[in-house]
Image (cartoon, rainbow, N blue to C red):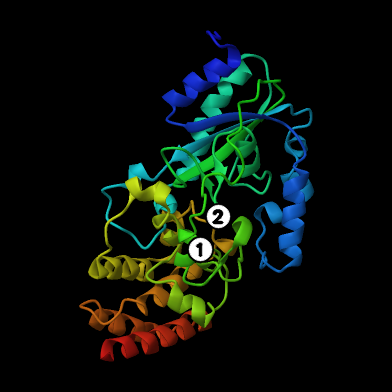
């Protein structure tokens, strides 16, 4: 039964019960502005083979391509930043330490029941090449585009994952907050990115983005391997320095704890590794990508108490049958040995 405020009011109430934030509603439109941006960035080489919304811009910039007859897009965010507070800092980016997108999809599906019960059709889209989720969210006023290309919302910053419900319901749009108004003159993320991947106007050069490079197969570029720090999946640097995320700040990581986590990845069998990290995007579902990243990260542990065991561990992988792992181990061994002598 729909209460006061109509369907829109019931959506807001259900979203609060589901723990969703930044609920917004926008009209279904072809996002020609985003299609033009994707084309420009692709032509400039910034894509670097990335698929996602680049794969088929005609589809990803048109909600009606996913649901013919679409009239509205409901956007909402699931905040993962606070839920990870108190956890031991990890070599995995915070959004990926749990299946944040899986949790978001479940909540969006339950939110969509409000529309289905009223006789409408819904399609839930999150972390998919089917839709540029940030655009309808910004149009509906849920938050802003940030200079690091992420989406920021009041009270939660950018430590959220966002998704959409495309529907044939003609809903009343919510009021937009404006575009690119959230950053002002702040350029903290641009200055903090160790590879200079964040470009003006909210663009990111995937060729230099640590997060993207850690997802690609093959050998890591030597500059990326050194700049990635002790990371295996994702990169939170531009979020950690963002003023919006100060309340979600994480403590300093312990090198010995990081060593244990990296060693655990390397000693885990492929099938078990894929099962444990089933929610991560790995090209070809290849677990050696994670192991490659773990070997590269070992080379960045520095000359502290973790160095002796890290050196020993890397030595055992130099003779790996996998040439990418063997070369990565050799390069990390050289890098770590050099830092240990300083």
Q: Residue 338: x percent and y percent?
A: 33, 90
| Number of numbered discs on residues | 2
Identify which residue, 184 or 247, lies in the foreground: 184
Residue 212: x and y in percent read 55, 64
User: What residue sits 54% from the left and 79% below the top?
Assistant: 221
Q: Residues within 10 Å of mark 2 (few under 14, many from 20)?
A: many
Q: Quadrant of residue 11?
A: top right
Residue placed under numbered mark 1 in the picture: 190
Q: Is residue 95 left or right of residue 302?
A: right
Quadrant occupied by the N terminus:
top right
Q: Are marks 2 and 1 in contact (CB under 8 Å)?
A: yes
Q: Is residue 135 visible?
A: yes
Q: Which is more toward the observer, 278 or 194?
A: 194
- Residue annotated with mark 2: 147
Please report the residue visible at 61 percent of the width from the left and 61 percent of the height from the top: 200
In this rendering, position of residue 269 left or right of residue 106 = left
Question: Dot 2: what SS?
Answer: loop
Q: Residue at x 28, y 84 (%)?
A: 312
Which of the pair 278/109 is nearer the observer? 109
Mark with earlier residue (2, 1): 2
Q: Position of residue 278 (x, y in %)?
A: 48, 53
The answer to whether residue 55 of the structure is visible from this angle is no
Q: Secondary structure at mark 1?
A: helix
As measured in the structure, the alpha-carbon distance from the residue carrying label 2 to the one carrying label 1 is: 8 Å
Q: Residues within 10 Å of mark 1 (few under 14, many from 20)?
A: many
As drawn, 163 above or below 200: above
* Rendered-image quadrant of the C terminus: bottom left
Name the residue: 48% across, 19% down: 13
**240 lies above or below 260:** above
Pinpoint residue 337: horizontal percent, then vertical percent.
Answer: 32, 89
């Amino acid at each position: 039964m729909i209460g006061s405020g109509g369907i829109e009011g019931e959506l807001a109430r259900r979203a609060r019960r589901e723990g969703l934030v930044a609920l917004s509603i926008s009209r279904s439109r072809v996002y020609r502005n985003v299609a033009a941006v994707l084309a420009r960035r692709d032509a400039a080489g910034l894509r670097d083979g990335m698929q996602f919304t680049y794969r088929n811009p005609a589809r990803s910039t048109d909600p009606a391509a996913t649901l013919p007859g679409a009239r509205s897009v409901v956007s909402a965010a699931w905040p993962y930043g606070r839920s990870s507070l108190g956890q031991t800092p990890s070599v995995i980016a915070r959004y990926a330490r749990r299946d944040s997108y899986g949790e978001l999809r479940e909540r969006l599906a339950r939110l969509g029941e409000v529309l289905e019960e009223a006789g409408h059709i819904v399609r839930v889209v999150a972390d998919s090449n089917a839709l540029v989720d940030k655009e309808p969210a910004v149009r509906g006023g849920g938050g802003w585009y940030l200079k690091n290309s992420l989406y920021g919302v009041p009270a939660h910053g950018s430590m959220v994952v966002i998704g959409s419900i495309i529907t044939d319901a003609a809903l009343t749009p919510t009021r937009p907050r404006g575009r690119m108004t959230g950053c002002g003159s702040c350029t903290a993320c641009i200055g903090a990115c160790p590879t200079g991947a964040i470009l003006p106007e909210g663009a990111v050069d995937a060729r230099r983005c640590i997060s993207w490079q850690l997802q690609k197969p093959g050998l890591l570029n030597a500059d990326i391997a050194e700049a990635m720090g002790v990371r295996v999946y994702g990169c939170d640097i531009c979020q950690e320095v963002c003023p919006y995320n100060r309340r979600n700040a994480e403590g300093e990581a312990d090198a010995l704890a990081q060593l244990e986590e990296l060693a655990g990845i390397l000693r885990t069998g492929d099938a078990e590794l894929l099962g444990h990290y089933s929610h991560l995007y790995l090209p070809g579902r290849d677990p050696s990508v994670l192991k490659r990243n773990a070997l590269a990260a070992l080379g960045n542990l520095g000359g502290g108490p973790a160095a002796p065991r890290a050196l020993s561990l890397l030595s055992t992988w130099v003779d790996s049958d996998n040439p990418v792992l063997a070369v990565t181990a050799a390069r990390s061994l050289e890098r770590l040995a050099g830092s240990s002598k300083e």
